[in-house]
Image: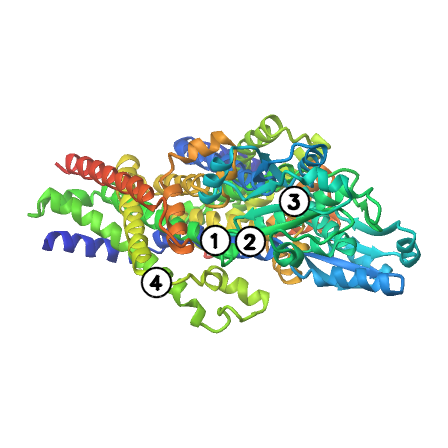
Amino acid sequence: MKLSHNLQVFRAAMKMEWAQLCANRAFVILSALAAISLIVMVSLFGLTGSYAPVAVINQDHGPFSRRILEAMDHAYHSFALKFPPPETAEAELMSGRLVGILTIPNDFTAKIEHGETANLDMRVDNLNVDLTNDVQRALPAAIVANGRNFPGVRVQMEEHDVWPHDTSYISYLVVSGLALDAMLIAGILGALITAREWENQTLKMLRMTPASFAAMLLGRLVVAASAAAFALMVALLVIVQIYNVVPASLSSVLLALSLCVIIFVCLGACLGVLLKRTLTVVPLMFGLVMPFYVASGALEPARFDGEVIWRLAHLSPVYYAVGLLEWAFHGLHVTPEPIYMDLLILLALALGSILLALNRLSRGRVR
Amino acid sequence: MRAIWGLARLDLALWLRSPGAIAASLLPALGMGVLVAVLTNSVGQQPVALVVQGQGRFTERMARLIKGDGDAYLLSEMSAGDAEQALGEQRVAAIISIPENFEGAVTNGNGIVDLYLNNVDIDLSDDIRRSVTRSVAEFDAPQLGLLGELHGVAAGENLPNAYRISVREQDLRETNVTFLQYQVIPILILVIVSSGLLGTALLTARDFSRQTAKVMILSPASRLSLVLGRLLGGTLITLALVTPLVAFGFLTKNIPYCADDASPPLWLKLILSGPCGWILPVPSASHALALIALLAAVTLGTVGLGILIGMWIRDEKLVTMTGLNMAVYLFFLGGGFTTVAFLPDWIQRLSNFMPTKYAIDGLRQALFYPDLIGVGRDLMVLGSCAILSVALATFALMRRWR
């Protein structure tokens, strides 16, 4: 009797939430748009993380100048070589469109053939230290690749990788972007459910009903989670179809993503109960997503950013979600904790959030 | 005039009493500031373990070269076992190992330095590969190290090395701008866009949703005064947020833990986040004027746009969501997080339509460059956008309040 009654309440809550979502279509659409926008925008960062644009003024055209240019092309994704006329190169460097200009002198090949040392002239726009560092480190790498068989070279580097293949930066970024999306969309939709009770002043009525609070809340959260899952499926489709990032295991990705949605909807519901206003929840979520994103191992494993940041990252649910999704998508372990631990912590957070939300909602309830 | 000032003061007071609106304006920008601070700590240097297994002068020299490249590594010397454990626990991203037989191998011309790399993504992996390759290259060609590149050879001179190529680097500028300083400019623009756009849009939407617009229309003040009052109110809201931030940016070097030579612990840097790294250079008079003109044009442009959005949407929740979405696009496509010039052509073309691009370019030029090349164009674009948005907002609001 009680179970069937609770099921009735659950279904009614689902219907009511569906009606609410339909009435707020524009808001839901804008939330989904924000999710896709964020993925696209963070991937822009990935596009400029490598391939610094460098103009080459080649006055030599001998075999060794060609070899050094080939070596630069293959020097760890470092250079996007361009070959404009000198005046254009100068203008582009001065207007910040190039990181540097490399000049290969006309006696370059001749000197190397005679066993002498030739000079490469590099003018660097050292405004941005990060890019300057990349160029300063990549040029010796190209020179080494070019001359590793010359007599007199006594030491070489031998690389042993932990993972069988490299993961491109964008592939890595967009997957962690999915965790960010899950937090943003599912969190906002979850928060709306609970904050609305205070905004519309319906909480008093809710507290007077004899129906189960848990059934009511779960029914509504299921609808919010479904809407969030739909938006995330669109984002996933964008990642697979447009970014060509193919999951190692689609079933693992779908499972991990669904879990993330459920967990973030619960966390959102808790946040809505604590803040009680949509107008505060939405910007707070927007404000939190980017620092959470970066500090949670979204650009590289969080522990590489230092022990302090790594410890702080444990406060962010995105840290565990990124760990779960990177494993599901690429088979990578980006948290030192095992994947099952990430999952357990996320589930514990979800459970804790739901209990806290229920406790706050039912406080002062008439029985 | 009194009516204009009265409405502007009312708007400012209303906004100051709306924690939700203040949160909407500030939180995304502050979040981005923390992000940039975190990012600054994570770019450039990577945690690496150095394992020295052999002994002898070549081994010591190789180890010294690796240890000397403090710009590239956060190096910890460990035993092989400890390093392996650290790699597994992600305390280090790579192990550089100088093997036991290094001395003999170098004497025979086939020395190997092993790199055990957690190649989780190419950005991190390539940074380490480049750095280790440079350190290894320095062994046979000292001029390929950073100091060699910067100060190695004078024009026309040559120092022979085994790779037969050396680099003569010429830096375009005398001073290097830190990544944090470089990135703080877009954050400032994001604060202006968020507060100008969202603050004004929320106030305008509230007038319609709560019907307070009718009360204002019934007042004896002219329509134009009301419109100008709203514009001034939006501008005051933005200035109330931006002025202390900019002032703080110029004053940070006088604050303990924020000065150039201070080395605060990482956790403190993170708490101070954006402000710690602002340390903005004090500009000359002409650069300061350009700076003020640019900031004023962006503020007016966003305030006008805020009125248009508020009038069009009229729902506070939707206004917040739309405003935040717009701020995200304006920020990222304007070059907030990246250098637009290094992006694909189609994004660069799209970026040309983003006023924030001109604002970011102009402010960086005025603050970090010795001349004002391009600032005139930036000011013209931003000024035109400001005039257009203010004119449209005035026209639309006067029609609506008729």
Q: Residue B123, labelled with which disc?
A: 3
For badge 4, the amino acid type reads Pro
Badge nearest the viewer, 1 or 4: 1
**Residues under labels 2 and 3: Cα distance?**
16 Å
- Secondary structure of residue under mark 1: helix
**Residue B186 percent across, percent down from the top left:** 43, 49
For badge 3, the amino acid type reads Asp
Contact between labelled residues 1 and 2, with CB atoms less than 8 Å apart: yes
4 or 3: tag closer to the N-terminus: 3
**Residues under labels 2 and 1: Cα distance?**
9 Å
Which residue position is annotated with label 4? B244
- Left or right of A260, for residue B188: left
- Secondary structure of residue under mark 2: helix
Which residue position is annotated with label 1? B182
Q: Mark 4 lies on which chain?
A: B
Q: Residue at x 88, y 54 (%)?
A: B106
Hey, which quadrant is residue B62 in on the image?
A: bottom right
**Residues under labels 4 and 3: Cα distance?**
36 Å
